[in-house]
Each structure stands twice: as structure tokens, then as C-alpha cells.
Amino acid sequence: MTARQTSTAHAPGRDEETATLFSPITLGAIALHHRVVHAPTTRLRANSDDTPSAMMVDYYGQRASAGGLIITESAHPSYDSRGYEGAPGIYTEAHVAGWKRISDAVHGKGGLLIMQIAHDGRQSHVDLSHGAAPVAPSVVPFEGQAFTKDGWVPVSPHRALAVEEITGLVESFRRAAERAKAAGMDGVELHNANGYLADTFLQDGTNKRTDRYGGSIENRMRFSTELVEALVSVWGPGRVGVRVSPSGQWGSISDSDPEATFGAFAERLNRYPLAYLHVIEPRVKGVETIGEGHDPVASTFLRRIYTGPIIAAGGFDRRGADAILKRGDADLVAFGRFFTSNPDLPERLRRNLPLTPYHREAFWGGTERWYSDFEPHQAPSTTR
């Protein structure tokens, strides 16, 4: 099968099911023409110095649409914050120049671009940090994997951060936000999900600290709120988003009372002039359990607390996306896997065109094949 061939799971046609999905909306200071968002999707195509590659410029430019929002894959604020070989950085001027080429490509098609910034924390390996141990709020051993030049390998044992190191970490995010602005981004997103560093501070399954960054929910939120304040100090109102995964288990993350933790965090985020809250939904099939006696926490729950726009992500199709918008549980929907293989996904969803299948084997690094070689939909030729 070539990248041009399409699946038959979606019959062509035009209807009114997606009227809400293709209505305009404003996220803080960011005005959009539709609500189909490109989710942050790690693809590991950066150059060897973590600079965005020419392939990445092509990829993002192909998926830009007029008035559409793309959230980038995670960009790392320091060399030792990576958990994946091939992930892009935002800690040198060369990185700024590389990302500027991407933002120019997206803006050239009328799209908007938000950079996700992440520290991968304990999900890393000494080969990715000049031999330094991965860091976390506390030492809670787990069996995870990191992606190195040798492929997937078990993570290295991590160490607990000293309290005096935290100020420097926050500063690295602030500097990354400044570089993102210099690279022409329209905003930034804090990756506070998927068991990465900020998420491990927030949840009590990974945060066993007894200082001001641990114990109570108030203390466990402190690192995340300091990061939010650092990003807002650079970008101002309406251009900073936060991503959370309240029901996620990636990275062996857990919390004893996720509703209390994420409810309090959402309430705290109301204090800041954010653009949005980005919520990873529990999967429709194989719903992730988050602890005995706890229901999954999703946009439906957080909508009752968070007063700003909500982006929902997690296995949506065309009808499911419009349904969650019409229920009012979210304001926009982020698509990941099908955006990887359909550069014109918003138009395909709008017109209910067939979708090209994605290829999982190309998700974690590789060449242009099954990355930037997918083509937009082409109507079948007719003969007279």
C-alpha cells in the first residue's frame, strides 16, 4: 500500500454533522477558523543536534490550514530533559532558527502554531544526558523505556531533585518560552501529562516529598504553577496552554484521588490568563483504570471546574469529535494518529472523505516514508 491509498472506513459525502467542529472560536488571544487541532505527536525526526529537520518543516507545513491550530511535538528546554533520541530541542539559537522555518511554513498557509515544552523527567536514560541520572520529585522505581541511539532500552535509575535545583528547572522553561517566541510561535503549551516531570510532581503516586513541593495537593501543584507563571511571564495573556492526562498510566503514573488532585489543579489554573486546558481523554476502548474505586477523569468532569476553553484529545473520529463539542464538554478536539497520515485532515473531516491509514511503525523515528510523503485527497479521475 502506498501513502496515497486510502481506507474505505469512511464513506464520502457531505452533511451537517460537523457544523460545530467547523465553527470559529477564539482561544485567549488566538482566533481560529475551525476546531480541528493537530495534537502534539512525537515523531523523532530532529537532526543529530536536536535541531528541527527539513523533514519536519515539510511535515508541519503540509498539515497547516487557514485558521487551524497545530500543537507541536514536545520541544525540550535543556539537553538533559530528553527521553527520546531524535526529539527536538529549544535550548540553542540553532534550535530557534530551525523552529522558525517551521513557523514560517505554517504561517505561510494561514495556520497557527503552539510549541509544547516538556521535561521528560524519570522517563530517560544516561545516554541522553551525558551520563547524568534522570530526575524526578522522588525515587519511585518503575519499569519504563527510553528511546536512545540503540532503540528502546530500559530507563536508567532516577534520582530525587534537591529543592534548590527546582528554581533552575523553572528558569529553563522560561528561557525556552523566550526562544519559542523568537522562533515565531503563536504560543506555548506546558506538557503536564503522561508521567513526565511536571506530572510526576502533581500526582501522589510519584511525589513522596515532604518539603514545600510534596505532601498536600497545594504543595504538589507548586512546581506546575511555577512553570505556568514562568511561561505566562514571557507570553502574556491568552497564549499559554496546559496539557493534562488525569486518567493516564503512561510512565507508571498514578494518584490516590485523581478527582481531588485534578479538580484542584483545574481550579488553580482558573487564576491564570491561559488560552486553554488540553485534556487527554480515557480511551473509548480499553478504558484505563486509575485506581480501584475511581472513575476515569475526563473533560466532562473538568468542564464543571475549569472556566476557560478545553481541548479534548484521545482517539476521536469525526462524529465523536462533533458530539463532544455539541455536549459542551470540550471546545476543540485534537487529532493525532490520523493527522500523521492525512495532511489535509480538516478538509477530509469537513467533506467526510476517506482517511489514509496511519503506520505505527513510522511513529518513532525514520525517514520521509510514512511521515512527510502522504498526499492530500485526490478525487478519482474520470474518463469520457
Image: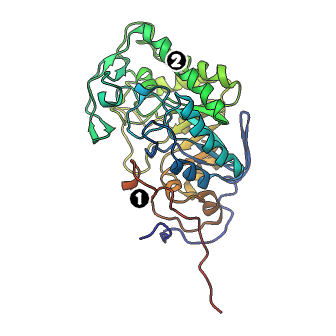
Quarter location, residue 247: top left
Residue 322 visible at all: no
Q: Above or below — where is 284 with respect to 13?
A: above
Q: Amino acid at mark 2?
A: Val
Residue 219 % position (x, y): 47, 12
Quarter location, residue 293: top left
Element class at badge 2: helix
Quick one: label 1, few (<14), some, or many (20+) residues within 10 Å? some
Observer-nearest residue: 292 or 266?
266
Disc assigned to residue 170 = 2
Observer-nearest residue: 279 or 82?
82
Between the C-alphas of marks 1 and 2, the distance is 36 Å
Observer-nearest residue: 183 or 376?
183
Q: Amino acid at mark 1?
A: His
Residue 262 % position (x, y): 50, 26
Which residue is painted at 36% across and 55% down in the image? Answer: 361
Quick one: label 2, few (<14), some, or many (20+) residues within 10 Å? many
Disc assigned to residue 359 = 1
Residue 55 % position (x, y): 51, 51
Sequence order check, earlier mark of 1 and 2: 2
